[in-house]
Amino acid sequence: MIAFLVDEKSDWPEKLHYSHRIAEALQNSAATAKLLKEVHDDIAALRKFKEWLNGRRIRRTFQNPDQLNSEVRGALGAWLKGHSDSTVTVEPQTKNDPTEYLKQLANQCSWIDIRAPSSKGDGPLCPDR
């Protein structure tokens, strides 16, 4: 697993920051203590998650969509080099009807292994298979 996160130094749009929810609520006279706590907790949880990722060296950062594209392509290329025996080699039957190809692709790629830090901070919640 490699996580791709926005670089802290990037010029990211304000409306995509957690704190934007507070600014928007203030402008609409809808700010509440509950919202402030939610945003505060969300920011703290994100910080803790980033620290967890940093400790496992499974994180890459990007500053814009083009750089993210490049990082993901590079990571996938490196992964494919190490897993050449498991690459998808299915070709569509016809150029006009990709149905069979999509079914085979879904069968080969329809799972995801999600892991999260335990509440004690000592490893994944889901043990290795």
Image (tube, helix red, strand yellow):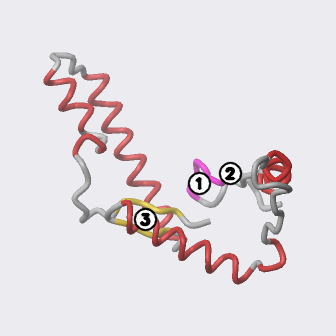
Alpha carbon separation for disc pair 3 and 2: 28 Å
Rounded to the nearest angstrom, the CA distance separating label 1 from label 3 is: 24 Å
Please tell me whether the stretch drawn in magenta is mainly helix, strand or loop: loop
Q: Which mark is residue 117?
A: 1
* The image quarter in which residue 79 lies: bottom right
Left or right: where does residue 59 sit relative to residue 77?
left
Q: Earlier in the sequence, mark 2 or mark 1?
A: 1
Local secondary structure at mark 1: loop
Q: Are marks 1 and 3 in contact (CB under 8 Å)?
A: no
Left or right relative to 59: residue 22: left
- Rounded to the nearest angstrom, the CA distance separating label 2 from label 1 is 6 Å
Label pair 2/1, CB-CB below 8 angstroms: yes
User: Residue 25 at x, y = what percent?
Assistant: 21, 24
Indicate whether 34 appears above or below 115. above
Report the front residue among 57 and 28. Answer: 28
Tag 3: amino acid: Leu
The N terminus sits in image quarter: bottom right
Magenta residues, start to end: 114-121
Question: 10 Å neighbourhood of mark 1: few (<14), some, or many (≥20)?
Answer: some
Instruction: Give the residue pinned by disc 3.
Output: 68
Q: Residues within 10 Å of mark 2 (few under 14, many from 20)?
A: some
Q: Nearer the viewer, mark 3 or mark 2?
A: 3
Q: Earlier in the sequence, mark 3 or mark 2?
A: 3
Residue 114 coordinates in the image, percent (x, y): 67, 52
* Quarter where residue 40 is shown: top left
Q: Which amino acid, by three-letter code, is at mark 2? A: Leu
Q: Is residue 124 part of the magenta span, yes or no?
A: no
Instruction: From the top left corner, tell me how far across and down residue 101 is, in percent.
Output: 82, 53
Mark 2 element type? loop
Mark linked to residue 125: 2
